[in-house]
Amino acid sequence: MNYLSVEGLTKSYDEKQLFSNFTFGLDQGQKAALVGVNGCGKSTLLKVIAGIEAPDQGLVSFRKGVKVAILRQHPEFDENANISETVFSEDKEELNLIRDYELGLLKTETDPANASDLALLVEKMDALNVWDYEHQIKTLLGKLGLHNLEQKMGELSGGQRKRVALAQALVSNPDFLILDEPTNHLDLEVIEWLESYLATQNLTLLMVTHDRYFLDRVTNEILEIENGNLYRYKGNYSHFLEKKAERQEMEEVTISKARNLLKTELEWMRRQPKARGTKAKYRVDAFHDLKETANSGSRDAKMEVNLKGERQGKKILELDHITKSFRSSTLVADFSYVFKRKEHVGIIGPNGVGKSTFLNILAQRVKPDEGKIDVGLTTKFGYYMQDETIFDPNKKVLDIVKEVAEYIKLDNGSEITASQLLNQFLFPPKMQHNFVGKLSGGEKRRLQLLRVLMANPNFLILDEPTNDLDITTLNVLEDYLQSFSGCLVIVSHDRYFMDRLVHHLFVFKGDGIIQNYPGNYSDFRNEVGIPASEPVAPSKKSKVPLKKEANSTQRKLSYNEQRELKELDTLIPKLEARKSELHHSLSSESEYEKLQALSEQIKEVEEELEEKEMRWLELSEFA
C-alpha cells in the first residue's frame, strides 16, 4: 500500500539547484534513509515532503488518513512551556487525558489530597479505554529519560531538548515518521533504544542520519542523492555500499569506453569544415552526448586531509587527583591519568555526567576544584566543540579561514594557501567567495573542523564531531584520525566512529566516577552484557494500584485463578524468550518481506505478552 508519492520535485536556493525532477514513493512499512554529501539537499527534501517548505515544482502527496509526524534537525520550542505541554501539544482527547493523568500522579506523590482528582481521571481513562496507549507513552517517556514533566523547556540541555522533540513526534502514534538526524545530541543508551524501537515498529520511516550502525539496523531502503541524481537501493546500509560500488564500477566502464570513442569523434569533428551538411548533424549531436558521458565521472570530488601535526615531547598531559563539582553534583572525583604518545581515548556516559566539562578541563578552559594539571611544553591543543561555532554570516568563507592563517603546513612539509586548503575540504573557488550565511549546517561544521585542524594540533579534542557531517566526510576524517600521530580524545554518540578510532575508553558512571576500560565501544557493550538490539520490557505501572485502593474488601483467588497464575509464571518467560529470539532474527535480516513478517510476529508476541502481564498483575493483587 503506497503511503507517499513524490513526483517531479524540484527545489533551488539562490542560484544553486539542490534537486531536480525527483520522483519516488514509499509503501507501508518501508524504512528508508536519504544519504549524500553535505549541501546536496537532504534536509530540504525532508522539509518539502513534510510541507514545511514549498517546492519550486512538483507534487508531494500522502495517502488519505495517513498520520505524519516529523522530527526536525534543530527543533524550536516555546521556552516558557514545560515538557508536558510540549510533548502533548497535539490537541487530542486521549493525549490530553494521559498528560493530565501523568501530572496527577506526580502531584499525588507530593500531596495525597490530589488523590480524588486522580480517581476522576482514572474513570475517564476507563471510559475511553486508553490504558494501553498510556502504557506505551509512559514507557516512551521513561526510555527517553523524561521524568520531570513540569520542567521548563528553557532550562533543558541540547540532548534533553532532542529527547523532548522525539517524544513529541512519537506520542502521536504516527503511521509515517520523518526524522532529520535523530541521533544528534542523544546519549548512546537512548540511541540504542530508539534503534530497536524503530526497527520493530510497524510504521513507515524516511530519515536522514550519518550513524552507520543505525542505518544498518533500521533501514530496508537507501535513497542516495549524488551529483543531482537520485539512486534507490533495496536493503540496509551495508547492502547499499555493495550495490553502489557495483554501480560506480559499471559507470567507470561506460565512461572509459566513451572517452576512447570521444578521441576518434574529436578528430572527425576537427577535420570537418565549419559549414557542415545536414547529413552529419546526427553525428554532431551524438558527439555532444558522448562528451557529456565522458566527462560525467569528473564531478565526484573527495575531501582531503593531509595536515601536519606538531611533534610531541616526552611529557604530554598529566592529571593529578582532579576533582570538579557543579552545584551539588560531582562530575569528576579524584581522577588521575598520564597521557601517552599516540593515545586514542573515547569518552562515553549518559548526558549530564560531566563529559564536556572534562574536555574543558583537559583544554584548560575550566579549572578543577582540586588537583593539578601538568601540560607538556610541546603540547598544542585543538578543540572541536559540540556547539557549532557562530561565524559572522556576512563574512565570506575564505575570510573565515584567513583569520587563522593564509598559509598552512602539510604533512609532507610543503605549504598551501588558505584557498587551496578550502578546495581540499570541498569548498571550491566559487563557494569560497559565498557568504557563510548561505552554507548548510553540515558545511558550517566542516568549516569549523577545518579551522581546528589547520592550526596543526598534536593533542586533538573532539566533542561530538560527527554531528551534521555527511558519511563521505566522516570516512575521510576517520582515515586521517587513524594515522594521527598525536593524542586524540573523543566524545561521540557515533558507535562506528568510536569503534574504528579509539584504543580504550573513559566510562563516566556518574557521581564523578570514571572507569578506564581497555577496548572500544562494542567491546565494552559486549562485556557488560547489554546487546544494542535488545529492547527492555516496558514498565507496567498504571491504574492497578488505584483500582486496588478502590476495592476496600480484599478477596482470595479461586482454585482456577491460582492455577492460571501458576501457568502465567511459566508462560511469560517463554514469551519473553520468543520476543528476544525474534529481535535477534530481525537484526540479522535484510530482505524487506522477511523484515515485515518478523515485525508482525514481534507485534503479536508483544501484545500477547502485555495481555498476560496485565492478567498476572491483576491476579497477583489477591495472591
Image: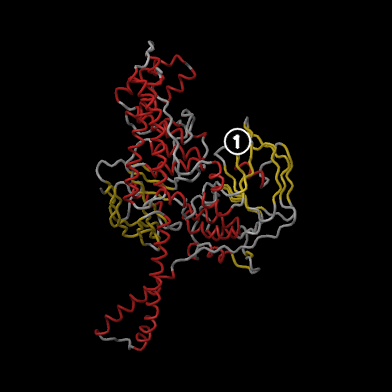
Q: Which of the pair 135/180 is nearer the observer? A: 135
Which residue does the numbered mark 1 point to in the structure image? 510
In this picture, residue 55 sits left or right of residue 215: left
- Residue 56, x across and y down, in percent: 32, 55
Q: Which of the pair 200/42 is nearer the observer? A: 200
Which residue is drawn at the image coordinates 46% and 35% (left, top)? 143
- Residue 291 falls in image quadrant: bottom left
- Residue 516, x across and y down, in percent: 64, 44
SS at mark 1 in the image: strand
Q: In this view, does 171 lie above or below 337?
A: above
Q: How many circles with numbers are drawn on the protein?
A: 1
Residue 290 visible, this orientation: yes
Q: What residue type is labelled 1?
A: Gly
Q: Which of the pair 329/593 is nearer the observer? A: 593
Which residue is drawn at the image coordinates 71% and 57% (left, top)? 312
- Residue 344, x across and y down, in percent: 62, 52
Q: Residue furthest top?
A: 553
In this picture, residue 70 sits left or right of residue 449: left
- Residue 65, x across and y down, in percent: 26, 41
Disc 1 crowd, CA 10 A, few/some/many (<14, 14-19, 20+): some
Residue 385 visible, this orientation: no
Q: Which color scheme did the rendering employ for the protein? A: secondary structure
The C terminus lies in quadrant: top left
Q: Which of the pair 53/303 is nearer the observer? A: 303
